[in-house]
Amino acid sequence: MIVEERVYTMIPGGVPRYLAAWNQHGREAQVDVLGSPLGVFTCDVGDLNTLTYLWQYASVADRTDRRARLMADPRFTAFRGEVRGLLVSQHNRILLPVPGTGD
């Protein structure tokens, strides 16, 4: 099992606009292909104007397959076009579980 952390930094005021578009157009495609996220978070202190997603996958190969399917989904392509102007930067990390600390 791996967890992908995806952090998006947006223009000031962009997070609420992004979430409105995501809930209306992007979320269904992501959940259909990736499954429900482990969590979606905003930041109250520190790096403001950020949105963090945590996604769980069986393996890196599973992630690669599902991400490719998501990028080919026309619903998600349309959503990406809607929010592109809100994004300033993005960084992703693959998190590996520490043996003996969970399932």
Image (tube, grey):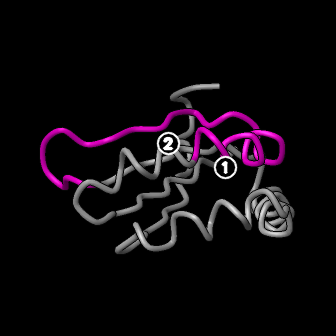
Residue type for callout 2 = Ala
The residue lying furthest to the top in this view is 103
| Foreground of the two, 93 or 85 | 85
Judged from the image, the secondary structure of the residue bearing numbered disc 1 is helix
Figure check: 5 above or below 43? below
The residue sitting at 33% across, 56% down in the picture is 14
**Residue 24: image location, x then y, percent:** 63, 41
Judged from the image, the secondary structure of the residue bearing numbered disc 2 is helix
| Foreground of the two, 10 or 40 | 10
Mark number, residue 11 = none
| Residue linked to disc 2 | 20
Mark 2–mark 1 distance (CA, rounded to whole Å): 9 Å
The residue lying furthest to the left in this view is 45
Is residue 31 found left or right of 93 in the rendered image? right
| Residue linked to disc 1 | 26
Figure check: 86 above or below 15? below
Residue type for callout 1 = Gly
Is residue 72 found left or right of 10 in the rendered image? right
Q: Give the range drawn in magenta.
A: 22-49
Residue 42 shown in magenta = yes
**Residue 40: image location, x then y, percent:** 47, 38
**Residue 10: image location, x then y, percent:** 33, 63
Of callouts 2 and 1, which one flags the residue occurring earlier in the amino acid sequence? 2
Residue 55 lies in quadrant: top right
**Residue 81: image location, x then y, percent:** 62, 70
Quadrant of the snapshot with the C terminus: top right
